[in-house]
Amino acid sequence: MHFKPKFFTLLSRMLALAFIFVLLGSRQIPAQDSQVYVTFWHAMDGQKGKVLRELVERFNMTHPGIIVDEKCVGKSERSFADAYNILFSSILENLAMKNPPDIAQVYENWTTQLIECGALVPMENFIRGQQGFNQNQLNDIFPVFLEANTYGKKIWTLPFNKSIYVLYYNKDAFWRANAAPPKTWTELRQLARKLTVSQGDYVQQYGLAFDPSVDTFGHWLYAYEGNFLTKSNEVGFNNTLGYKDIQYWVDLVNTDHSALPLPSGEALKEFQNQHAAMYIETTSKLSSMEKCNFNWGMAPLPKGSVKAYGFAGTNLAIFANSSPEKRQAAWTFVKWLLDTENTTEWAIQTGYLPVRKSAVESFQYKAYLRKNPEFTAAIDSLQHAICQPRISTWQTIRGIINDALFEAISKKKTPKKALDDAAKVIISQRYVK
C-alpha cells in the first residue's frame, strides 16, 4: 500500500485557482480596514501543517472580507515535547491574559474545562443561526463525532482532525511467516511470537512495536467492554478486567519478548526500519508510511468480546472573547473548512478521517479508496468508535495511567499494584467523583 498525492486533488486545486482569478477579477477587494481578522491556533506541523496552510490560503482568497491568520502553536525544539500540550498551555495562558485565539483545536476534555470557565461560544449558536446547518447537513456528520462534541444536549465544538487506531503490518514479513492480520487479541499475541526473529540475544525483528500508554491500555479494555471510568465518573479500570489488560502488555514484553515498548514516534521508526513487523497507531501516521521500503498494510485492531476502537484527534472551538464580527467570521471559516469538499481533501492528503458521510461517498474519496483499499479498515472501524472520558481532569488521569503502564512493564511494580496505586492517586486527589 502506498500513499501518494492524487491527480484529482491537483486538478481540483487548479480549477479552484482558476475560479479565484475570475472572481477576483470581477470583484473589488474590500479595503484593509473593512476586513475581519481571525486568529486560528493549531498544532499541525510538517506535511499536515502545509496542507492546512494551503486550505487557509484558499479560504482567504475566496473570502476577501475575512483574513484567517493560522499559527502552529504546538512547535517545540524538544524532541519528545507534546505539541498538543504546548497548544493547550498557550490557550490557558492567553485566556488568563484575556487574549485567546478566535479559533483553536481542542480535545474533548479541554472543552469541558473551557466550558466551565466560560471561554467558548457554543457552535450550536451558529449551527441554528441564519448561516448555519440545515438538519441534513448536521446529520451528515458522523454520529460518534457529533456525540463527542455535544455537552448537555448542546453542540459546543465540531470535529476536525479525527483519526482512529489501526494495526499497521509488514506484508513481506507476514508473507514469509505465512500469516494473516490477527482478528483477536489472543491471535495478536500468538502472531507477535511467531514474527519475532532472533539470533542469539539479538532480536532482528520484534513481532510488535507499541507505545506503552493509556491509549494502548484502552485498546484491550474497550475490546472487552470495559472503560476507564464508570457512568458516574468513578474509577473503573482497577478491576479484574483491568488487571488482565495490563498483564497482557507486560507478558508481550517480559514473558514472550515479542514486543518493543517505545514512545509512538520511536516505535514508528522501528516499524519503518523493519525492526518490528506490526505497529499500533492511528491513521494520522499514514503519511509517515512513505518511508517504508517494503510492502505494508493496514488492518482493524483485533477484537475481544466486541469490536471497539478508540479514536483520537481534535475539534474546532470558537472563543467567547472575540467580538461578534470575529465570531461570525470564525464560524464562516469553520463551516467552510468542514464542508464536504474540504474535509475530503484534508482526509486524502493527511490520513485523517473525513468527518462527513458525504465525503466518504464522494467521487474523490471513493477513487482514493480504490487505490488504497486497505484504508477501508479505518472507515469501517468508525461504526465501532469510542470516545475517551471528557472530564476536565482527564489529561492528568492519562499521565497517571501512563506511569502505571511504565512501572508494570519495567517491573518496578506488579501489574496489579501499578493499577491499584494509580487508582488511589486519582481518587485521593479527587480527579474523579
Image (spheres, rainbow, N blue to C red):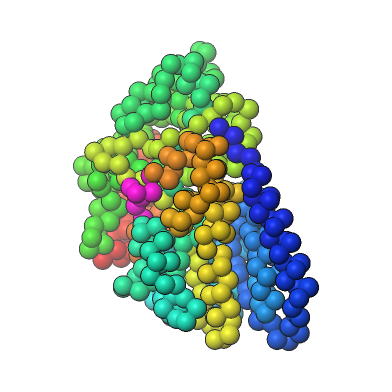
Q: Residue at x 30, y 52 (%)?
A: 228
Quadrant location of the N terminus in the rendered image: top right
Asked whether 26 or 301 is in front, the reply is: 26
**Percent position (x, y) of residue 391?**
35, 65
Asked whether 32 or 219 is in front, the reply is: 32
Vertically, is 77 above or below 329?
A: above
Q: Residue at x 74, y 78 (%)?
A: 27
**Quadrant location of residue 255?**
top left
Quadrant location of the C terminus in the rendered image: bottom left
**Percent position (x, y) of residue 153?**
31, 72
Question: In this rendering, does residue 42 appear at all?
Answer: yes
**Quadrant location of residue 186?**
top left
Magenta residues span 381-387
Vertically, is 143 above or below 305?
A: below
Q: Does the segment drawn in magenta span residue 309?
A: no
- Judged from this view, the residue extending furthest toward the right is 25
**Percent position (x, y) of residue 90?**
57, 68
Q: Residue at x 54, y 69 (%)?
A: 334
User: 373 left or right of 10?
Assistant: left
**Quadrant location of residue 32?**
bottom right
Question: In this rendering, does residue 407 appear at all?
Answer: no
Vertically, is 408 above or below 322?
A: above
User: 73 left or right of 27?
Assistant: left
Q: Residue at x 73, y 83 (%)?
A: 30
